[in-house]
Structures are given as structure tokens and as C-alpha cells.
Image (cartoon, rainbow, N blue to C red):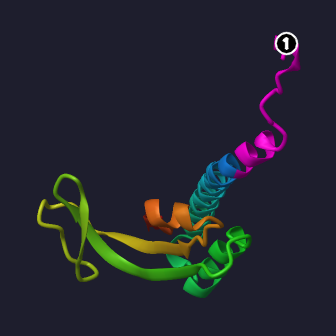
Amino acid sequence: MTPTDRRKPARAGTAAIEFGLIFPVLLMIFSGIVDFGFTAWARGRLAAALSSGAAYAMLAGATVNTATLKTAVQDAAINLPGKAVTITGPATYCLNGTPAHAVATASGGACTDGSAPGTYVGIRITYSYQPMSPFYAQIFNSDMVASEMVRLQ
């Protein structure tokens, strides 16, 4: 037997086996990247809807209609199914402390620091993103909340 007569080791199918082993890992990484992108997009839509509602409330002023404001926010977040929009107010609040927090006061009263209270409306949007990948759902919280308090002029 000469050295050229020796048989080479069988390597047929090893690439398919290696691909079969690594493919689930690559699929999990790719679906996580896609889910992360969709989550970022949804957070952007929530922020845009909140901004749209705040602009509407500021332009409408003290005569803002909460049903119309809620519709404006829902229309701005139309691409987010299952969102919940909550509107509170308009009500009279004083801002106290650092960081500022709103304290409800009687209309016509004065704040503890002597300033006049303002009329505010609260906007809150909640959305629960349903990820494609169960791995992503285990790592990150998919519940999103955006809220804002707008002073009416």
C-alpha cells in the first residue's frame, strides 16, 4: 500500500450538520434584533402620539374636550393595536417639590408657595408589545407606558 492509496476521511455532509447546529442560534439572534427594532419603533410611536395629544391640548386650551383629545391621541398611535389611552382632567393642580409633582387644589385657591394653581390635563398611553421571539420576552419587559401632564393656557 502506497501513501497515495490511503483513503481520505469521509467529510460528506459535515457542512450540513454544522449548519444545523448553528442555525437555531443564528435564528434566535436575528429574531432578537428584529424584536428590538420593533420595540424601538413602538416606543417612538408612543412618544409621537403623546406629543400629538399634548400639542392638541395646548392649542385647545382650557376648553379642551377630553373625548376629542383621546381620539386625537388614538389616531396618532393608530399602528399600535391594543393600546389604552387614559385622559385625566382638566383639573387644577399646584406643582410642588423637586422634582415637581402635581397636587390637586381647589379652583381659585393658592399653592403652598404662593403661586397661582394651573389647569392641567393628564395623558397616559399604555401598550403591550407581543415579541416574535420567546427569548426576547424573557429578557425584556414588553409593557410600555408613556404619560405627560400638559398645562392648559
| 106 left or right, relative to 8 | left
Of residue 147 and residue 68, the one placed in the foreground of this image is: 147
Give, as a three-letter code, the residue at label 1.
Thr
Magenta highlight on residue 119: no
Quadrant location, the N terminus: top right
Name the residue at the right extreme.
5
Magenta highlight on residue 13: yes
User: Which residues lie in the magenta part?
Assistant: 1-20
Counting other residues with Cα less than 10 Å from the Cα at mark 1, is it few (<14), some (14-19), or many (20 or more)? Answer: few
Of residue 132 and residue 103, the one placed in the foreground of this image is: 132
Q: Is residue 28 above or below residue 94?
A: above
Q: Secondary structure at mark 1?
A: loop
| 94 left or right, relative to 43 | left
Name the residue at the top extreme.
3
Of residue 97 and residue 143, the one placed in the foreground of this image is: 143
- Can residue 130 be seen here? yes
Can you tell which quarter of the image residue 133 is in?
bottom right
Q: Position of residue 6 (x, y in %)?
A: 82, 22
Can you tell which quarter of the image residue 59 is in?
bottom right
**Residue lying at 60% horizontally and 58% vertically, measured from the top left:** 39
**Residue lying at 63% horizontally and 73% vertically, measured from the top left:** 73
Report which residue position mark 1 lands on. 2
Q: Is residue 20 above or below residue 105?
A: above
Q: Position of residue 115 (x, y in %)?
A: 21, 60
**Residue lying at 63% horizontally and 61% vertically, measured from the top left:** 42
Q: Position of residue 4 (x, y in %)?
A: 87, 14
